[in-house]
Image (cartoon, rainbow, N blue to C red):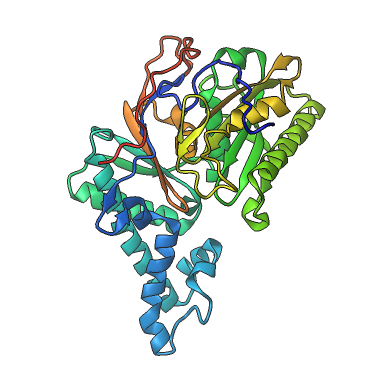
Amino acid sequence: MGSDELVKTTDIAQHGASRLPSVDVDSFNIEIKDDDGFLGDRASKGAFREILEEWRKPLRKSGEDPFGDEPSDKISKKALDAVLVGDDTEATAVVHSAIEDFAQELAYVTRRFLKTKAWAKTECIVVGGGFRASRLGEIAIARAEIILKSEGFKVDLVPIRSDPDDAGLIGALHLVPSWIFEAYDSILAVDIGGTNIRCGIVETRWKKAPDLSKAVVFKSDLWRHADDEPSRETAVKRLVKMLQGLIEDAEAEGFKLAPFIGIACPGVINADGSIEKGAQNMPGNWESSKFNLPASLVEAIPQIGEHDTAILMHNDGVVQGLSEVPFMQNVERWGVLTIGTGLGNARFTNRRKENGNGKDRDSTESGKKKGKADKE
C-alpha cells in the first residue's frame, strides 16, 4: 500500500483497548528503571545466561567447567534441563546456582512491580515467555514465589498453562466479541516477536467450554524473520502469505473461520493500530506514523469467507496473558510477566459477567484509552 494511505479496519473495538470482553487492562508495557537501566533486563532470558556464565568462570579457570567450551548462550534449555536430573553433580550444582540467582532477580523485579500503583492488590501473577517452557524456568518461578511469600507478599506466581508459543495465539480469542463464537468455530491469530512471526488457526471449542478453557491451536506456521533480516514491506508480504495459506487450510479442514484476525505485537499499541514505541526489534521501522499493520492486512485480506475482515491488535504480553482468563476466575486482580528477550508485563482486573460464560455482551464498546507506558 502507499506509504501515505491508510485503510480503516472494521471498527468492532479499539486497538490496544483498556476494556476487553473479559478483563480491564489496568496497565501494560510498564517501563521501570533502576540505576542499572530498565528493570526488566534483570529478569530476561539473556540475564539468566549471564548468571550461568558467572558461575562457570571460576570452574573454567581451574579447567573443571562441566560444560567445556560451549558458550553459555548456546547451551539449549533442553540440555540444561537434562543436567538437572543427570549424574554430573558439579554441572547440576552450577545450574541450580544460576537458577537461585535468577529467582532472586525475578523476585526483586516482581516486588518492584507489586509496589507500583498499577499493580496494587495483585493476587496472582502468571509467568510466560520462552524461559518458562523449561524445567529450570519452572523451578526459578517457584523459587521466586517462595522468596516473595517469605517477605510477606500475598501473591501466587504460576507458570502459564499453555505452551508460551500457543498462549500467544490462544489469547487472541479474548480480544473477540462473544457473538462471533456463536457463528464461527475458529479464528486467525498472529504473534509477532523480535525474532519470529507465528500465525495460527485457533479452534475455539466454544460449545465444549464457553469460557474458552479448551481452546487449542489447530495449526501454526512459523517464520524466523531475524535470520532473513527483511524490510518492513517484505515482512508484511510474508505475513499476508502465511495468513492466506492458513485461510486455505481452514477451508480444507471444514472450519467455520471467523472474519477476524487477532494480532499480538510488542510495544505500546495506539487506538488506531499504530505502534507508539517498543517495536525497535521488528524488521524495519514499525513505529512510523505512516505505518499501520492492521490497515495493511485489511487491504491485503479484505474478506475472509463472505464477510469483511475485522482486525484487533494488542501488546504481546497482554495477549499471552489473556490465554489465562478462564483459569483466573477465582481472583479479581492478576498480572502476567513474560520472560523472553525482555520482560513483558500486563495487569488485569476481571470483569464479572452475568451470563456466566466468561465473555461480555457489550464487548463491541471501545474502552477508554489509558497511558500504558507509565513510568514509576
Question: Residue 60: where, in percent of width, then height?
Answer: 42, 84
Q: Residue furthest left?
A: 152
Rendered view: 359 above or below 294: above
Locate residue 56: give its quadrant: bottom left
- The answer to whether one can see residue 203 in this image is no
Where the N terminus falls, by quadrant?
Answer: top right
Tell me which residue sits at (40%, 61%) in the image.
47
Rendered view: 75 above or below 352: below
Question: Residue 31: where, in percent of width, then height?
Answer: 33, 44
Q: Nearer the viewer, residue 91 or 233?
A: 233
Where the C terminus falls, by quadrant?
Answer: top left
Tell me which residue sits at (49%, 66%) in the image.
80
Rendered view: 141 above or below 179: below
Tell me which residue sits at (52%, 50%) in the image.
281
State how many labels appear: 0
Q: Nearer the viewer, residue 234 or 143?
A: 234
On screen, residue 297 versus residue 117, left or right, reads: right
On screen, residue 369 versus residue 188, left or right, reads: left
